[in-house]
């Protein structure tokens, strides 16, 4: 799969939106699952916001480069626990460039 790329050394901001008749009865919970053999994350330890907010902020420098993750936002109606909704977003952290070639034309010259 092709994931949206995020920069590992910058904070990640995920905005969730919940539309309900009674928002005060809705309980939100963020979670994360590692994908493609990436190391697991302890979301409680790397989040800068509570995992019960509509917005999740993941601290900078807390996800390894080249890793893939699926972040879930689960919404449960406390008056009807069997009802609810879930949404997810897949992200992959960037990797530094590697095995590149630079060619300058002309190979020699003078700065102007």
Image (cartoon, rainbow, N blue to C red):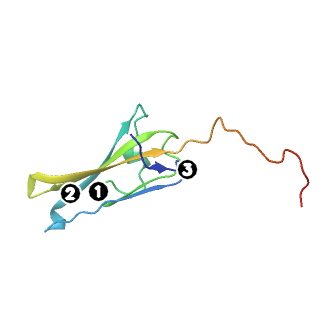
The residue drawn where x is 65% and y is 34% is 99
Res 96 quadrant in image: top right
| SS at mark 2 in the image | strand
Q: Are marks 1 and 2 in contact (CB under 8 Å)?
A: yes
Instruction: Report the Cα–Cα distance between label 3 and label 1.
Output: 24 Å
**4 vs 67, nearest the viewer:** 4
At label 2, counting other C-alpha atoms closer than 10 Å, the crowd grade (few under 14, some 14-19, many 20 or more) is some
Percent position of residue 2, x then y: 41, 43
Task: Identify the image quadrant of the N terminus.
Answer: top left
Percent position of residue 76, x then y: 17, 54
Q: Is residue 86 above or below residue 16?
A: above
Residue with the most extreme front position: 106
Going from the N terminus, do you reach mark 1 or mark 2 first? 2
Instruction: Report the Cα–Cα distance between label 3 and label 2.
Output: 30 Å
At label 3, counting other C-alpha atoms closer than 10 Å, the crowd grade (few under 14, some 14-19, many 20 or more) is some
Label total for image: 3
Q: Is residue 77 above or below residue 91?
A: below
The residue drawn where x is 41% and y is 45% is 3
Percent position of residue 75, x then y: 21, 55
Instruction: Report the Cα–Cα distance between label 1 and label 2.
Output: 7 Å
Percent position of residue 48, x then y: 43, 55
At label 1, counting other C-alpha atoms closer than 10 Å, the crowd grade (few under 14, some 14-19, many 20 or more) is some
- The disc label shown at residue 9, or none: 3
> Which residue is labeled 2 in the image?
27
Task: Select label 3 or label 1 by which is in front.
Answer: 3
Going from the N terminus, do you reach mark 3 or mark 2 first? 3
> Which residue is labeled 1 in the image?
52
């Amino acid at each position: 799969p092709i994931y949206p790329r995020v920069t590992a050394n910058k904070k990640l901001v995920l905005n969730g939106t919940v539309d309900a008749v009674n928002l005060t009865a809705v309980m939100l919970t963020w979670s994360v699952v590692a994908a493609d053999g990436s190391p697991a994350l302890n979301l409680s330890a790397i989040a800068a916001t509570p995992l019960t907010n509509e917005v999740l902020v993941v601290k900078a420098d807390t996800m390894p480069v080249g890793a893939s993750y699926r972040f879930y936002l689960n919404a449960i109606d406390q008056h009807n626990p069997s009802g609810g909704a879930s949404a997810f977003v897949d992200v992959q952290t960037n990797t530094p460039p590697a095995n590149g070639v630079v060619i300058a034309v002309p190979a020699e010259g003078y700065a102007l």
